[in-house]
Amino acid sequence: MKVKLDATDQNILDILIENTRTPFTDIAKKYDISAGTVHVRVKKMEEAGIITGSSLRLDYEKLGYSFIAYIGIYLHKTSQTQFVLERINDIPFVTVAHVTTGKFNIFCKIRARNTTHAKEVIYMLDDIEGVTRTETMISLEESINDKKRLMHSIFRAL
């Protein structure tokens, strides 16, 4: 179901996607509306399922986890997907996992301290029953990570 967002809703989302902790009073001042209006609009978008929560961004490099790799996982049988995903979920260094079509059955993103640690994580994935092999791609740099461009494109299409 497509939900219609007006310019006020879009302005509120524009600020919140940049920083979910922005006080409603600051948003209200910027767009010359009341904080109550911001609150009601946000509540409406939450109830419609457009806003599904808020998130916190961490500087993983400062925490010692700057190594990023993407792991394609091949399974012996597709029917093992759920079992393997449950095992992957037990590995905290796997931050994202997708069930995919094409070359891999599952595609994961991992964060590690360094190459030695990444190797350990890859071995953990390899050791899961049903995994036949993995293929690793090391991220040299995250060049684009911009949710706002997509959001603005969606707004133009509404």
Image: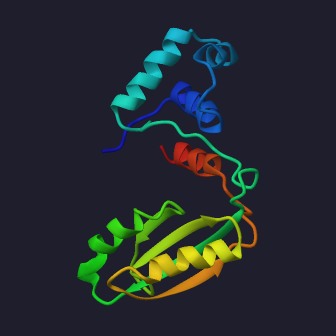
Tell which residue pokes out farthest to the left in this image: 79
Q: Quadrant of the N terminus?
A: top left
Label tally = 0
Residue 133 rendering spot, x and y as whole percentages: 45, 90
Identify whether 86 is placed above or below 20. below
* Foreground of the two, 16 or 76: 76
Residue 72 rendering spot, x and y as whole percentages: 50, 81
> Where, by quadrant of the figure, is residue 82 drawn?
bottom left
> Where, by quadrant of the figure, is residue 152 drawn?
top right
Residue at image location 33% in from the left, 82% down from the top: 129
Identify whether 29 is placed above or below 133. above
Residue at image location 56% in from the left, 9% down from the top: 34
* Foreground of the two, 16 or 137: 137
* Foreground of the two, 101 or 55: 55
Residue at image location 54% in from the left, 78% down from the top: 122
Q: How is the image coloured?
A: rainbow
Residue 55 rendering spot, x and y as whole percentages: 54, 40
* Foreground of the two, 145 or 3: 145
Residue 92 rendering spot, x and y as whole percentages: 49, 60
